[in-house]
Amino acid sequence: MALLVLAYASGVVDRIVIGLLVEPIKNDLQLSDAEMGIIQGFAFAVFYSLFTLPVGLLIDRWRRVPVLWIGIAVWSAATVAAGFARSFWSLFAARVVVGAGEATTTPGSSSVIADYFPPQLRPRAFGVFMMGGSVGIGIAYLFGAVAIRLAGGLREDFPALLGSFADWQIVFMVVGAPGLLLAVLMALTIREPQRRGATETSPKVSLLPLWRELRVNRIALLAIMFGAIMNVMIVNAQLSWFPTLFVRVHEWDSARIGTALALVGVPVGLLSAITAGWILSWMAKRGRTDGPILVMMVQCAAWAIFGTYKCFAPTPELALAGHVVTSMFATWAVTSALTALNQVTPNQLRGQVVAVYTLFLGLVGVGVGALAVGLLSDLVFTGPKGIAPSLATVCAVGGVAGIAVLWFGRRSYQASVVRAQAWEEDT
């Protein structure tokens, strides 16, 4: 579990550290906000999404641990490669490969965790796993801030190697390298768990069982996935553009922003990960079969209210206060979604169902959020401070839409839970 948390954290670091580097990358490569939105969101999301279904099939039919450590090695190497980018397209290509590698994390880790822990302990286990997101965000901001401060010194100390690179390029190299060591450590130490309650897998590859499962539970799965997607869309928009908001609206430098967001976000984010699993377990013990749906709705409400507020906060201190509140709920939706999907899906289809979830999570949640803010900033709320209403719009619209769809699918999800419990008792 510790290594899975570190792997998740490593992926988050490599994914979001670019949010601290928007302004220098824009200036060096002469890019618009929309192009930066594409690089931060869509470029990552393309292969992150396209690889999820084949990865899910592989996870359901083969050993999951090799899939995980190979994925880490791929995205870490691609992050280092981003440090060599000299144009929009070379940076775009590096981000595409980062996404392809990270497509292994959620399906592989969730399948392994579901077999390491019995059903009554899974919500807390997924909550612990989601600590990787909070840890990763903190490391990305803190490590990114340190790397920004060190980049100039490293270039002076190693002029033959780094003399021709900009600070932001050196930052990518520094943050990507540790993931390669983590991949080796995972390959040497993690044990492949025995699959719980799985029927024998046919050697024939077929998507028909997956299609049947999606059709039977369509409304419940739609609610789970859409609720998580709206939350992740807002989270990724925030990760991509909230540091830039501090630069343009509050006139802070990148290193100061990274340090502040890390000091505020890490402890509160860890609390979020721990409380998400605890609350889900607490609700389940009291017979609430709709616990994951309700928890996701709470996070949507937090984004709609406090996410919007922190974008318009008149001072950086008040913006950070709003950030504390939204960080309290930052992992609730994804913890709830993984718990819910594994709760209503048979073992032999979990990797594929989570892969479908990851597919839409990538295309919409990761791909659309950052791009939407960039487009709004370029076309609607123009000017340097237009980033604030652009980001606030995504928070408000995404939060309200998530609440509406989750409420619509709540009863269907409860029926799916009852159906899955009866199936488990029969098998």
Image: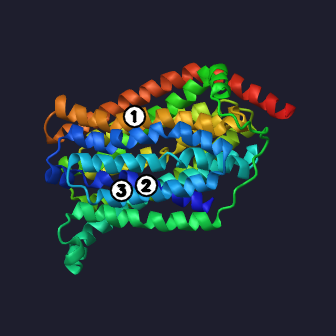
Please name the colour scheme applied to the rendered image: rainbow
Of badges 3 and 1, the one in the foreground is 3
Of badges 2 and 1, the one in the foreground is 2
Label 2 is placed on what type of residue?
A: Trp
Residue 45 lies, with reference to residue 11, above or below; the image says above
Number of marks in picture: 3
Q: Dot 1 surroundings within 10 Å: few (below 14), some, or many (20 or more)?
A: some
* Element carrying mark 3: helix
Give the residue displayed 59% in from the left and 64% down from the top: 187
The answer to whether residue 361 is left or right of residue 112 is left
Residue 33 location (% of width, % of height): 21, 40
Label 3 is placed on what type of residue?
A: Leu
- Report, in whole angstroms, how far the alpha carbon at label 2 lies from the one at label 3: 24 Å
Residue 223 location (% of width, % of height): 56, 25
Residue 56 location (% of width, % of height): 59, 40
Quarter of the rendering occupied by the N terminus: bottom right
Give the residue displayed 29% in from the left and 39% down from the top: 38
Q: Which mark is residue 75?
A: 2
Q: Which mark is residue 261?
A: 3
Asked whether 178 or 222 is in front, the reply is 178
Give the residue displayed 74% in from the left and 36% down from the top: 202
Residue 310 lies, with reference to residue 73, above or below; the image says above
Asked whether 132 or 386 is in front, the reply is 132
Q: Dot 3 surroundings within 10 Å: few (below 14), some, or many (20 or more)?
A: many
Residue 358 location (% of width, % of height): 51, 38
Label 1 is placed on what type of residue?
A: Ile
